[in-house]
Amino acid sequence: MISKRVRELAPYKTETTEAKVRLSSNELSLQLPEDVKKRIGEEVSRIPFNRYPDPEARELKEVIALRFGVKPENIVLGNGSDELIYYLSIAVGEFSSGVFCPVPTFSMYSISAQVLGRERIEVRLNEEFDIDLQKSLEVIRKKKPALAYFAYPNNPTGNCFSEEGIRAIRNQGVFTIVDEAYYHYSGKTFLKEALEREDTVVLRTLSKIGMAGLRVGILIGKEEVVKEINKIRLPFNITYPSQVIAVLILRDFYHIIEEAIQTVISERQRVYKEMLKMEGIRVYPSEANFIFFKSLYLSGDELYKRLLRKGVLVRNFSYMVANCLRVSIGEREENDAFLQALHEVLTTS
């Protein structure tokens, strides 16, 4: 029989609706040059598909370590950050202890806890979408969770929580996971602390820098912590193609990624400024590769539908925050299509 805790689960929501302009999944709009695609094809053609990949993904770890300024021994790789979130929820503390996170945030933190039967300890963010520290500390002292997740910048709100708030919660004896999936767009990090402390790890990913299809998540921490987490890693969890392609791009073509990231940051500011000029929405500052905004007159559901009818797909977060949506920053032409559609919807409603 399927357990009660699984039957009560709400699955992770993905956005698969078809649209001409898809700005719903925070992917990096990256068009690789044809010569790069050819090199990738050549490398993939050499893969012995009848063989298992390197179970430790050693070459990939070395390249990632070089890019992030750490050692391979500081890294655990996962099939996306999702897998690493599961590992951490399994490894840290006993299942009788809870898992803390400020909400709204990335829902996999809560889902992984619920799958394991762990208590979910959630505190709403304040009006500035920052940690409500007073309420959080009150709940933590009462519930005594073993671990806490902080998306940094936060998804879907786009802001970085206060460093002091994160540290104050960690000081309550809570193992702290700082999910830096959008680090490349904020430049803010807890990496130094993760390398020095046994109560802190950082998560990174290749998914937000142009390699979402490879599903490579990265946990970075002190060697002693990494060694323990690696004990529960599933064997061969990073596929052969993912290892080969990621190594090639990170080693030989990382400059293309860096240029694309800078373009997104520039476009984020341009789109934000254009949205600020529009009546009928409230736009929130972002340090990620997306922008969170609130519909003031139309319901969030209605605004989402009207944009979709104009061929633009965004992510509707009204189920988390009333009448709020999130738009990913795409290529300039995609962003222009979104801005035009949004302007038309808001001025004809």
Image (cartoon, rainbow, N blue to C red):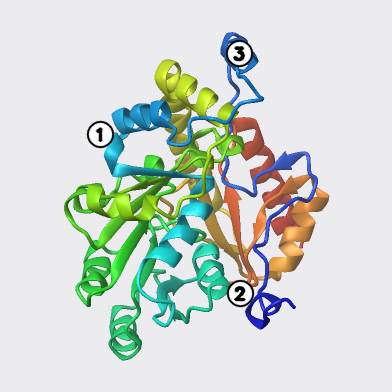
Above or below 7: residue 148 = above
Q: Amino acid at mark 1?
A: Gly
Marks 2 and 3: CB-CB under 8 Å?
no
Instruction: Tell whether 201 sits left or right of 28.
Output: left
First in sequence, mark 1 or 3: give its number.
3
Res 293 visible? yes
Query: Which of the two residues, 89 or 280, is positioned nearer the viewer here?
Result: 89
Q: Position of residue 188 (x, y in %)?
A: 29, 48
**Which quarter shows the C terminus?**
bottom right
Q: Position of residue 66 (x, y in %)?
A: 30, 28
Query: Which of the two residues, 34 or 243, is positioned nearer the viewer here?
Result: 243
Give how far apart the Cα atoms at labels 1 and 2 are: 40 Å
- Which residue, as the protein is rendered here, is positioned at the far left? 196
Image quadrant assignment for residue 57: top left
Instruction: Tell whether 275 sits left or right of 202.
Output: right
First in sequence, mark 2 or 3: give its number.
3
- What crowding class fits label 3: few (fewer than 14 Cα within 10 Å), some (14-19), or many (20 or more)? few
**Which quarter shows the N terminus?**
bottom right
Instruction: Tell whether 50 sits left or right of 119.
Output: right
Q: Which residue is mark 2?
A: 322
Q: Which residue is mark 1?
A: 69
- What crowding class fits label 1: few (fewer than 14 Cα within 10 Å), some (14-19), or many (20 or more)? few
Q: Amino acid at mark 3?
A: Arg
- Which residue, as the protein is rendered here, is positioned at the far front? 51
Q: Residue at x 39, y 81 (%)?
A: 97
Q: Residue at x 34, y 57 (%)?
A: 178
Image quadrant assignment for residue 154: bottom left
